[in-house]
Image (cartoon, helix red, strand yellow):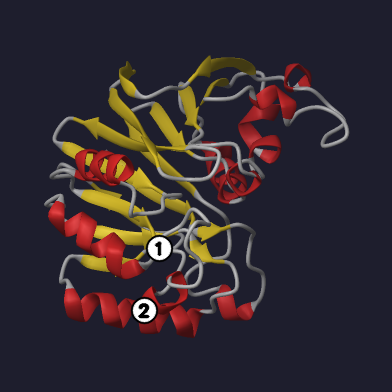
Amino acid sequence: MDVSIWGVRGSAPAVGSQFVGFGGDTCCVSCRSGDRLLVLDAGTGMIRLGLQLETALPARIDVLITHGHMDHLLGLPFFGPLSRADAEIHIWAAFDPAALFSPPLLPMSLADYPARTEVHALAAGTMEIGPFTVTAAALNHPGGALGIRVSQGQGSLAYLPDFEPGDLAGDSAAVALMEGVDLALVDATYTPAEYAARQGRGHGDWQTAGELAVKAGVRRFGTIHHQHTRVDTDLATISGQIGRRWKQGFVARQGETYALGG
């Protein structure tokens, strides 16, 4: 299973030369196995993914949306394969994404796109989507959000982009999703010092993210959902702090690909 990171930012895209090193698009991660593609979240990074698929369209694309906040949806209307009649796209969400494809937000409905699309309900639990085993669990986040574990063959990924630690049920669900995975991508919007003044906003810090990932026995973990104002030099500093404490930890960058289970 090849896992590619197309967007790493939270809340809003980051534009400018100070954000090029780690990337400025909002959250989007893909898992590919053979001719099937599983996409986690539809942030602005999804637009870049769509461009890459112009010459290599999978047989079917499944898009899993962790929750309905706009930074996780901004790329969906501009996802290239939606404009192709030969594309089959399944959208999974805990809400009706059709609300995005309607005035005053957009001038066209989902049915106006040429692709063959289906919308499915996404809820906590485990299901099979083609070659992927997908487990979703509720995490602690205002309005609700799902964390997702994807397994295929010997490879496994945990994706927890919007998650505030400190809630017993949410922390337990996060550790269970991450248990023993090859790679975990975990919300670390804040530094530990920042988090002290931002409790209740639905996000965590890199120190707690690392502690939970290590508790879960992950092989590697990367922080994601970077604050949209945090420049490359800031993230490089955080990367050094994480690396000195945990050899398996790093700051996730847009454009990276990982072969899991090989």
Residue kind at label 1, given as amino acid type: Ala
Is residue 205 visible to the viewer in this orientation of the structure? Answer: yes
Q: Is residue 98 above or below residue 70?
A: above
Q: How far apart are marks 1 and 2 (CA)?
A: 10 Å
Residue 188 numbered tag: 1
Residue kind at label 2, given as amino acid type: Ile
**Front-most of residues 37 and 101:** 101
Q: Position of residue 196 (x, y in %)?
A: 43, 72
In screen coordinates, is 243 left or right of 226?
left
Q: Is residue 201 above or below residue 3?
A: below
Residue 160 numbered tag: none
Q: Where is residue 3 in the image (x, y as percent from the top left)?
A: 34, 45
**Front-most of residues 62 and 250:** 250
- Crowding around mark 2 (Cα neighbors within 10 Å: few <14, some 14 to 19, many 20+) is some
**Front-most of residues 112 and 128:** 128
Q: Position of residue 247 (x, y in %)?
A: 15, 71
Residue drawn at point x = 70 percent, y = 28 percent: 83
Q: What element carries label 1?
A: loop
Is residue 220 visible to the viewer in this orientation of the structure? Answer: no
Quadrant in the rendering for residue 229: bottom right
Residue 238 numbered tag: 2
Residue drawn at point x = 23 percent, y = 32 percent: 151
Q: Is residue 77 above or below residue 43?
A: above
Quarter of the image with the C terminus is top left
Quarter of the image with the N terminus is top left
Q: Which of marks 1 and 2 is nearer the N terminus?
A: 1
Residue drawn at point x = 15 percent, y = 58 percent: 214
Q: What element carries label 2?
A: helix
Q: Do the residues labelled 1 and 2 touch (CB within 8 Å)?
A: yes
Q: Position of residue 61 (x, y in %)?
A: 48, 26
Residue drawn at point x = 43 percent, y = 77 percent: 235
- Crowding around mark 1 (Cα neighbors within 10 Å: few <14, some 14 to 19, many 20+) is many
